[in-house]
Image: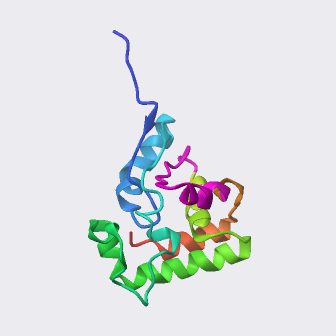
């Protein structure tokens, strides 16, 4: 009988949803050489910076999603966005680019699935592959989002 293994895994994985994948699946994927193509890599748009401390009731359909609803009211999430913005400025890149570059810096991640709904959203994230984060950048982001 032929054994068929997994070739890839599609976990919910982002800066703001780390524990589920990192706690158990990351090591298994590395050990078994399983490709990882995470969905919702921008945390339903939160990692793009479109949500602001000053406006915690944005006019958006995503407000009712569990993840966005939780993050909008979490000051630690805004501090993490501050770190993304600082690193983005240093790389002349947007926060979405930095969030995606962080995923691409993870050794088990093959390619994040971007859920662009418009051409402008697609254009906003395409440059992420050109952003190369230093180990220090990755460590700062890891520390800022460790609770997630």
Which x, y percent locates residue 61? Answer: 32, 67
Q: Nearer the viewer, residue 117 or 18?
A: 117
State the image quarter where residue 146 is shown. bottom left
Instruction: Give the residue at the far bottom of this rendering.
Output: 54
Which x, y percent locates residue 12? Answer: 38, 53
State the image quarter where residue 28 is shown. top left
Up the image or down, 108 lies above or below 68; here it is: above
Which x, y percent locates residue 15? Answer: 47, 65
Q: Nearer the viewer, residue 141 or 50?
A: 50
58 relative to 38 in the view: left or right: left
118 relative to 88 in the view: left or right: left
Residue at 63% across / 70% down in the picture? 94
Q: Quadrant of the C terminus?
A: bottom left
118 relative to 91 in the view: left or right: left
Q: Nearer the viewer, residue 138 or 42?
A: 42
Q: How many marks?
A: 0
Which x, y percent locates residue 11? Answer: 39, 48
Residue at 46% across / 52% down in the picture? 115
Give the extent of the magenta segment: 107-127
Q: Quadrant of the N terminus?
A: top left
- Does the magenta run of residues contain 66? no
Residue at 72% across / 56% down in the picture? 130
State the image quarter where residue 9 is shown. top left
25 relative to 86 in the view: left or right: left
Residue at 49% across / 83% down in the picture? 79
Up the image or down, 4 lies above or below 63; here it is: above
- Does the magenta run of residues contain 114? yes
Say how the picture is coloured: rainbow
């Amino acid at each position: 009988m032929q054994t068929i293994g997994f070739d890839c895994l599609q976990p919910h994985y982002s800066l703001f949803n780390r524990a589920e994948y990192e706690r158990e699946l990351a090591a298994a994927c590395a050990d078994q050489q399983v490709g990882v193509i995470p969905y919702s890599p921008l945390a339903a748009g939160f990692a793009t910076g479109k949500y602001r401390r000053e406006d915690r009731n944005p006019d958006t359909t995503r407000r009712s999603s569990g993840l966005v609803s939780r993050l909008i009211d979490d000051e630690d999430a805004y501090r993490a966005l501050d770190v993304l913005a600082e690193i983005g400025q240093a790389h002349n890149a947007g926060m979405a680019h930095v969030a995606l570059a962080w995923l691409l810096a993870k050794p088990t991640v093959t390619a994040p699935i971007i859920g662009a709904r418009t051409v402008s959203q697609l254009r906003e994230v395409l440059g992420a592959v050109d952003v190369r984060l230093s180990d220090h950048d990755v460590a700062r982001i890891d520390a800022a989002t460790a609770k997630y």
